[in-house]
Image: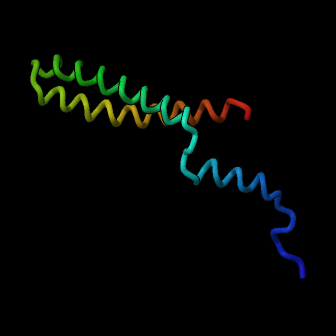
Amino acid sequence: MEDENDDLDVPQYQRFIEAWLGPNMRLTDNVIQGIFTLLCVLVASVWGYYFENRSYAGALHGIIGGLIVGFVVGGFLLTVFRLIKDE
């Protein structure tokens, strides 16, 4: 009796699972995303402070917005970079 998984290339299949479903363990990617998020938080907090009539609530709104934008955009840019870059 033949196993139906005999024709799968295990290292390639494992690489696919790790890339799409596994945690990101690349230190450089995590550092780049952390720095990008920090820059987004700093810029958005200053912008929110001045945009909302120099209030601390505006700075808080900017911090929250900067965190969201930093995580989402930073993750998207790293994903595109990893798709283009050959390993």
- In which quarter of the view is residue 11 placed? bottom right
Locate residue 72, reporting x and y percent.
43, 37
**Looking at the image, residue 45 lies above or below residue 22:** above
Question: In the image, is 10 to the left or to the right of 15?
Answer: right
Quadrant of the image occupied by residue 80: top right
- In the figure, 63 relative to 42: above or below? below
Q: Residue at x 43, y 26 (%)?
A: 36
Which quarter of the rendered picture does the N terminus lie within? bottom right
Q: Give residue 27's position: percent from left, percent from top.
A: 54, 37
Which quadrant of the structure image shows residue 46? top left
- Locate residue 35, reporting x and y percent: 42, 27
Q: Is residue 5 above or below residue 85?
A: below
Say left or right for 25 vs 47: right
On the rendered image, what quadrant is the C terminus found in?
A: top right
Report the coloring of the rendering.
Answer: rainbow
Q: Picture coordinates of residue 64 (x, y %)? A: 26, 35
Residue in the picture at 82% in, 61% down: 8
Extreme right residue here?
A: 1
**Residue occupying the point 82% across, 57% down:** 9
**In the current view of this chain or complex, which residue is farthest to the front?**
27
Q: Measuring 10% from the left and 18% from the top, which residue is drawn there?
A: 53
